[in-house]
C-alpha cells in the first residue's frame, strides 16, 4: 500500500513539475513578445522615410514612397519603401497600375521572426516575378536594440565605398545590407560609419545616425503578475508606459 502511495505522489509531482515548466515557458514567451515590441520604437518607419528621401535626392524624376501595395502576378505585396523610375499611370484601376517598384527596399531587425518574414517575402516576390520585371532588391538589417550602437568615431570623415564581404552567407551581427544582383544572388555588405554603397550612392551614416540615438528601457515597465491558485497558474501581463 505504501509503495503505491509513494508512486502516486511521485506521479503527481512529475505532472506538477511538467505543468510548471509549461507556465515558465509561457512567461518567457510573454516577456520576449513585450521586449520585441519595445525594440522598434518607430525606427524602421523613420528609416523607410529616409530611404525614400535618399532615392528622391538621387533622381528627382523618380516616384518614391513607402508602404505601397503593388501587384506581383495575382498577389498583393507591400514594400517597406521603393522607387519607381517612371511615375505610375492614374488612368488605370489601382491594382493594375501599381506595378512593383524598380528599387524594392526592406528593413528588418536581425532576429526571428522579423528577419525570416522579410527574406521569405523577397524570395516569394522574386519567384512570382519570374524575370518579368528587372527589379533591384535591397534589405537592411538592424541590431535588435538589446545593446547600444556606438556613435560615429570619426565625425566629418570623408565617406568611402564599401566592399562586399567575401562570404556567401549573411553576416551574424547587424547592421548589414543585402543587395540581390541581376541573377538574384544576395551580396552582403557590413554597414559601417563613413561608408556608402554604389546603389544610388547610399550613405550608411544616414541609417547609423538613427540607430545610434540614445535608447533605454527605463521609461518602459513590464509587469508580470503571477498568481498561483491551487494547481493552476494565471498570468496577467501588462505594459505600463510612464
Image: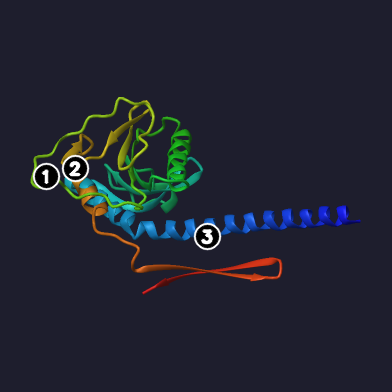
Helix, strand or loop under label 3: helix
Residue 110, percent across and down? 39, 45
How many marks on residues? 3
Does the CB distance between marks 2 and 1 fall below 8 Å?
A: yes
Q: Which residue bears the numbered disc 1?
A: 154
Picture quadrant of residue 118: top left
Residue 241 x %, y %? 39, 72
Residue pictured at 33% horizontal, 27% vertical = 182
Report the Cα–Cα distance between label 3 and label 2: 35 Å
Q: Earlier in the sequence, mark 3 or mark 2?
A: 3
User: Quick one: 9 or 160, which is closer to the camera?
Assistant: 9
Task: Indicate which disc, 1 or 3, sits on the residue closer to the N terminus.
Answer: 3
- Going 71% across and 70% down the picture, which residue do you hit? 230
Could you give the CA–CA distance between mark 1 and mark 3, rounded to whole angstroms?
Answer: 40 Å
In front: label 2 or label 1: 1
Q: Residue at x 28, y 52 (%)?
A: 148
Label 3 belongs to which residue? 30
- Quadrant of residue 197 within the rendered picture: top left
* Residue at image coords 71%, 66%: 231
Quarter of the figure with the N terminus? bottom right
Per the image, the residue denoted by label 2 is 193
Amino acid at each position: 500500500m505504501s509503495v503505491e502511495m509513494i508512486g502516486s505522489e511521485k506521479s503527481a509531482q512529475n505532472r506538477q513539475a511538467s505543468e510548471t515548466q509549461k507556465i515558465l515557458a509561457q512567461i518567457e514567451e510573454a516577456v520576449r513578445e513585450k521586449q520585441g515590441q519595445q525594440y522598434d520604437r518607430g525606427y524602421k518607419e523613420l528609416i523607410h522615410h529616409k530611404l525614400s528621401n535618399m532615392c528622391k535626392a538621387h533622381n528627382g524624376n523618380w516616384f518614391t514612397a513607402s508602404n505601397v501595395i503593388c501587384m506581383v502576378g495575382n498577389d498583393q505585396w507591400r514594400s517597406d519603401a521603393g522607387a519607381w523610375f517612371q511615375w505610375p499611370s492614374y488612368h488605370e484601376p489601382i491594382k493594375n497600375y501599381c506595378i512593383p517598384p524598380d528599387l524594392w527596399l526592406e528593413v528588418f531587425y536581425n532576429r526571428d521572426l522579423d528577419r525570416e518574414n522579410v527574406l521569405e517575402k523577397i524570395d516569394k516576390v522574386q519567384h512570382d516575378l519570374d524575370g518579368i520585371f528587372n527589379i533591384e532588391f535591397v534589405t537592411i538589417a538592424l541590431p535588435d536594440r538589446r545593446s547600444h550602437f556606438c556613435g560615429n568615431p570619426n565625425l566629418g570623415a570623408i565617406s568611402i565605398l564599401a566592399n562586399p564581404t567575401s562570404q556567401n552567407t549573411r553576416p551574424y551581427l547587424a547592421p548589414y545590407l543585402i543587395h540581390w544582383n541581376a541573377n538574384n544572388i544576395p551580396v552582403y555588405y557590413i554597414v559601417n560609419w563613413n561608408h556608402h554603397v554604389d546603389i544610388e550612392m547610399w550613405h550608411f551614416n544616414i541609417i547609423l545616425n538613427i540607430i545610434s540615438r540614445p535608447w533605454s528601457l527605463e521609461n518602459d515597465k513590464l509587469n508580470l503578475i503571477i498568481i498561483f491558485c491551487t494547481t493552476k497558474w494565471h498570468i496577467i501581463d501588462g505594459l505600463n508606459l510612464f
